[in-house]
Image (cartoon, rainbow, N blue to C red):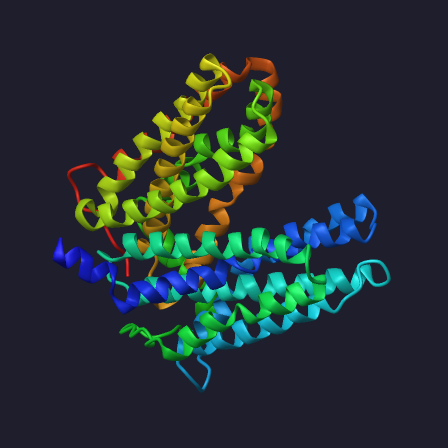
Amino acid sequence: MPATLRTLFSGRMLVALIMGFSSGLPLLLTITVLQAWMKEEGVDLSVIGLMALVGIPYTVKFLWAPILDRFTLPFLGRRRGWLLIAQFALAAAIAGLGFTDPVEMPWMVAFAAFLVTFFSASQDIVIDAYRREDLSDEELGLGSSLYINGYRVGMLLASGGGLILADHLSFTAVYLIMAGCMLPGILTTLCAREPRVLEGAPRTLRDAVVEPLTDYFRRPQALWILAFILLYKIGDTMASAMTTPFYLDLGFTKTEIGAVVKLFGFWATIGGALLGGIAMLRLGINRALWVFGVLQAVSTAGFAALARIGPSIPALSGVIAFENLSGGMGTAAYAAFMASITNRRFTATQYALLSSLMGIPRVMASAPTGFMAEAFGWESFFIVCTLLAIPGMLLLVKFAPWGKALSHFG
């Protein structure tokens, strides 16, 4: 246990936590907070809906990740140099968004919001690469869990804190405050160490684009791993997409949903990610994927049980606690696994590709969930989501059997 505590309270873990906060902060500033501002100003709902398109950089960030792998700026090193540029540009873009006018200049709002998402996605690319290169394979699980927890705190500050502040201040002031909240990340970038990568950067831009793909697909289990990334959390993701209509259908009030699901659930997720990270120090990533995957499936089945029980606050609290704890553990293991299979020569490009792939089920698999719930009924729908966890778990047999250490590639 002393060794675990030393790792938990090390400077490397503090860096992972603060960098997670810096990554999570900008996300909802172009969604929740911006939507509230535009609605308050009387902007048409169709225009508000179209603003979702400014989030495209998050899904295509792999397109410019090779540039960040190939070139090293003349200050702070290969990772921290790019990170500092991205963070200063992001803070400026957030502040600039606050000075736009949603009524008179909607296109300027869209452009400023696009800059926020572009520099935010660029920051994510470098932070993901930094975490992989700075932490040992054994530390990746805990580091990923602390990064995720910091990310969620940043999201909570931006969305919850931003909306609360907007009741008392102008939205311009809110965005200026949020730009100032980038300061901890900037200071961390200046004070953190630069990761040492023995293999060196790609020698040409072509190498930075082509080699990450050829390196990955030379691996004997490459296609199985891609299938696993697509399927590991698909049941959990599909179930989560329909939980709010499910709670309302059961008869829970919006206040009950907000108090139990959002506030209580938030802390359960934070606890789950932290527990998962600590457990991975003992279990290793391989076994953690098995254990947390089973817990995720069981927690999804909990919604089917809740559908049978009905609107019981104790039952809802129990299901939410278990689902968010296991979900936090599963996400931590998932993120650590993706980091562990990247080659340190081009971490930014490979991780950006894998994380973009990870987002596909969130969009594609969630789309038909409403039709499924209507066709099957709530209890059967959640049973189906539970069963959909099985293919992802079975794929672990191919490349990460229980008794075998997970292979690392860089």
Q: Residue at x 53, y 68 (%)?
A: 181
**Residue 192 left/right relative to 90:** left
- Which residue: 40% across, 52% down? 149
Q: Is residue 344 visible?
A: no
Rendering coords of residue 223 (x, y %): 38, 42
Q: Say left or right for 221 vs 84.
A: left
Specify the quadrant of the image occupied by residue 57.
bottom right
Q: Is residue 300 above or below residue 378?
A: below
Q: Using the image as rendered, state which of residue 167 and residue 42 is in the foreground.
A: 167
* Residue 58 visible in the shown view: yes
The residue located at (49%, 60%) in the rendering is 23
| Residue 43 in picture, x, y percent from top left | 82, 50
Q: Give the residue furthest to the front.
A: 168
The image shows residue 44 at horizontal and vertical percentages of 83, 47
Is 262 on the left-hand or right-hand side of 52?
A: left
Q: Residue at x 32, y 34 (%)?
A: 293
Choose between 3 and 258: the one closer to the eye: 258
Q: Is residue 52 left or right of residue 26?
A: right
- Most foreground residue, 336 or 311: 311
